[in-house]
Amino acid sequence: MPVLGQRAFILAPTTDKFVALAGEEFTRKIDLTGFGNGWSKIRVAIDCAVMDTGGGNITNSELFLGLCSGTAFPYGSKSCVHACGVVFGSQAASTWTWTAGAGSPYYTGTEFSMLRRVGVTQTTAAVGTLTRNIPTHDGNGAAATTKRRGWLGATFSQTATAINMIGMSPAAATMTGDVFFEHFMYATNQAGLPFVLETVCTQNTQTITPGAGWNTNALDTVDIYWSNTTYNLEIYAIAIEFTS
């Protein structure tokens, strides 16, 4: 079960609440009244951090950030109704490398994909590259007072025949800073490739063309899944930018 908690930061909000996922999934229905499945663009962004391992890597773990149809059977379910999103890492083979970061540790890695899923059947976009960077919540260690949050995003645009996806991660140069709420919203609301803490994100763009027989249930729900059961993913804020 997801855990609710709070953590102290120097920047606003100085005491930030979070939901922690460990082998779990968070879903939240979007109000698309009047649009149904006719939206043209949705960006989903999270302000997040991963629990510090104390210097060790995290292996075979994935973070799915995307959209699904309804809340009953999301991406992580074997009965998934319909999901589409960006996968940072992989449950089969990935390494989230703990990096000291001049006293501000973070995880980095290159395993990355975009996919669309119905049940356990999925179509994956062409393999691309993106270096993901996510801070640890412990800053300089368990006794540190400087905790950090990091921006992570996925943008979806659709036509009658395809869904275009962009996966986005902040640059390694920003890992020493804390993405507090105002900077989080500033990055999320930028029309193009976002700047996080004044540094442009890394990105990867892919297109999925649904084949015959693909489920057409509307993508109307934010879907976040973190597969690791030992090291929590903490989510401090979720934002959605919507274009009808």
Image (spheres, rainbow, N blue to C red):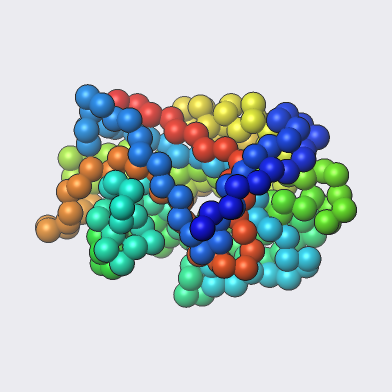
- Give the quarter of the image for residue 158: top left
**Measured from the top left, where is residue 139 in percent x and y?**
79, 50
Classify 37 as above or below 48.
above
Query: What residue is at 65 percent from the left and 46 percent from the top?
Result: 5
Classify 192 as above or below 91.
above
- Give the quarter of the image for residue 127: bottom left
Does the image show residue 119? Answer: yes
Relative horizontal placement of residue 218, taking residue 46 as reference (left or right):
left
Relative horizontal placement of residue 75, taking residue 134 as reference (left or right):
left
Query: What residue is at 12 percent from the left and 58 percent from the top?
Result: 213
Classify 48 as above or below 113.
above
Q: What is the residue that sits farthest to the left in this orientation? A: 212
Q: Which residue is at the front of the view, 169 or 37?
A: 37
Q: Quadrant of the C terminus?
A: top left
Query: What residue is at 69 percent from the left and 43 percent from the top?
Result: 6
**Measured from the top left, where is residue 123 in percent x and y?**
28, 62
Q: Which residue is at the front of the view, 1 or 53?
A: 1
Does the image show residue 129? Answer: no
**Measured from the top left, where is residue 150 in percent x and y?**
65, 44
Relative horizontal placement of residue 70, taking residue 238 as reference (left or right):
left
Q: Which residue is at the front of the view, 128 or 104?
A: 104
Classify 126 as above or below 85.
below
Relative horizontal placement of residue 17, taking residue 141 as reference (left or right):
left
**Measured from the top left, where is residue 227 in percent x and y?**
50, 64
